[in-house]
Image: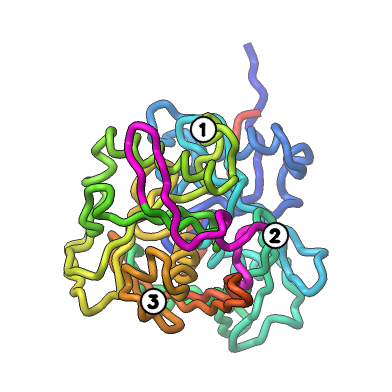
């Protein structure tokens, strides 16, 4: 019996923030994968190595975690005043589907570098030395993101001394601005309230702030669900009962946010919304053993992604945190001491992160204007991936 040879597809493996993913120029994908649909999904699933019932991604490029099972497709933008279109796919590990419902804020930091390296940015927009301002159209949520990419001698500067907690080695700093990041066309607070009572059958009723900023996110108080708010991954991810409880809370929150209409639909929408729990600032040890003093942070936040506690913080969730922190009366703002002015520093399992946010209120209607943070990014490998025909 003879078998067809593998397909060879040009690709770049990149780290962006605390995530890794496989990046593609749209034009380099097979023709049937250049349009949305089953062929594209099947191609990218095979690249990552999903679905993998062993949960290892041994036969693919994925890393068997939500932070490392990601794909990005970029194309030169035909949208006015934008440079590049950015489409993100969150690949499920043990199920045959890709969630296209939201953005990845961490990988956003790598979009500008990839676009420059692959000729998607006009040459006259790239200084010989300085900062290249790359205007990104985020296709998943129809929003504008601006990446500030350092350039040295006409090349993307990837090395540097910027330290990002959750990433082992320092690199060059990439500043990212999320412009008007309320998700899609929906309201910043889809229920119309800063705080809601979220009823979850069989579990209880919780105070919750549900916000559409960066990515739809449900915030609850740590002590309301039996936690300190300083937990690390093993305390949550090794507890299957706790994970099931978080997923149930997330699913009922998704209904209340209007993202789904039936609880079963949450199974096919794992990427959004996120669920996170907050607590006032207190001392704790990070996953690397570093001590974080209560005076170093405004509050602690822990968030789950694709059913597991994230080892650091998703970039899009950080947008939600920064936005909610500057709006008086949200659970995030209250946990931070109700006195946040312009920026907030929060603790996560790997360390701390500072986020700046600008929000305004018009006739009782809150709007977020811009959220900014610093990340880093670099190319890990470039060339081609191969998948069986």
Q: Which residue is mark 2?
A: 142
> Nearer the N terminus, badge 1 or badge 2?
2
Q: CA distance from mark 3 to mark 2?
A: 26 Å
Pointer 1 local density, CA inside 10 Å: few below 14, some 14–19, many at least 20 = some
Rendered image: mark on residue 263: 1
Q: Is residue 56 left or right of residue 190?
A: left
Q: Position of residue 60 (x, y in %)?
A: 49, 38
> Nearer the N terminus, badge 3 or badge 1?
1
Q: Residue at x 64, y 20 (%)?
A: 3
Circle 3 SS class? strand
Q: Quadrant of residue 42?
A: top right
For the C terminus, the image quarter is top right
The part of the chain drawn in magenta is 179-206
Q: CA distance from mark 1 to mark 2?
A: 26 Å
> Nearer the N terminus, badge 3 or badge 2?
2
Of all residues, the one furthest to the front in this rendering is 363
| Nearer to the camera, 174 or 380 | 174
Q: Residue at x 55, y 81 (%)?
A: 150
Pointer 2 local density, CA inside 10 Å: few below 14, some 14–19, many at least 20 = some
Q: Relative to 175, say whether 141 is above or below.
A: above
For the N terminus, the image quarter is top right
Q: Position of residue 104 (x, y in %)?
A: 54, 57
Residue 203: within the magenta? yes
Q: CA distance from mark 3 to mark 1?
A: 34 Å
């Amino acid at each position: 019996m003879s078998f067809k040879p593998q397909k060879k597809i040009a690709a770049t493996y990149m780290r962006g923030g605390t995530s890794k993913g496989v990046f593609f120029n749209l034009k380099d994908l097979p023709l049937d994968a250049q349009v949305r649909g089953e062929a594209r999904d099947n191609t990218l699933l095979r690249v990552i190595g999903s679905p993998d019932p062993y949960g290892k991604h041994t036969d693919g490029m994925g890393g068997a975690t939500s932070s490392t099972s990601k794909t990005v497709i970029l194309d030169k933008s035909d949208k006015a005043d934008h440079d590049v279109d950015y489409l993100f796919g969150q690949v499920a590990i043990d199920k045959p589907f890709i969630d296209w419902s939201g953005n990845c804020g961490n990988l956003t930091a790598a979009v500008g570098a990839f676009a420059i390296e692959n000729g998607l940015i006009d040459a006259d927009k790239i200084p010989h030395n300085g900062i290249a301002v790359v205007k990104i159209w985020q296709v998943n949520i129809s929003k504008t993101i601006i990446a500030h990419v350092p350039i040295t001698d006409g090349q993307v500067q990837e090395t540097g001394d910027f330290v990002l907690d959750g990433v082992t080695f320092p690199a060059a700093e990439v500043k990212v601005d999320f412009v008007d990041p309320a998700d899609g066309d929906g309201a910043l607070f889809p229920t119309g309230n800063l705080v809601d009572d979220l009823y979850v059958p069989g579990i209880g009723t919780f105070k919750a702030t549900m916000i559409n900023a960066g990515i739809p996110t449900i915030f609850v108080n740590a002590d309301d669900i039996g936690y300190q708010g300083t937990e690390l991954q093993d305390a949550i991810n090794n507890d299957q009962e706790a994970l099931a409880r978080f997923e149930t809370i997330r699913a009922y929150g998704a209904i209340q946010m209007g993202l789904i209409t039936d609880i079963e639909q949450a199974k096919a929408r794992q990427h959004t919304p996120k669920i996170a729990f907050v607590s006032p600032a207190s001392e704790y040890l990070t996953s690397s053993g570093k001590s974080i003093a209560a005076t170093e942070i405004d509050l602690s936040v822990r968030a789950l992604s694709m059913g597991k506690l994230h080892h650091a913080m998703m970039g899009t969730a950080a947008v939600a945190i920064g936005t909610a922190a500057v709006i008086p009366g949200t659970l995030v703002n209250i946990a931070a001491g109700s006195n946040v002015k312009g920026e907030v520093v929060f603790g996560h399992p790997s360390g701390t992160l500072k986020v700046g946010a600008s929000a305004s209120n018009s006739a009782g209607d809150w709007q977020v204007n811009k959220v900014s943070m610093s990340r880093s990014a670099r190319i890990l490998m470039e060339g081609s991936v191969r998948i069986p025909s």
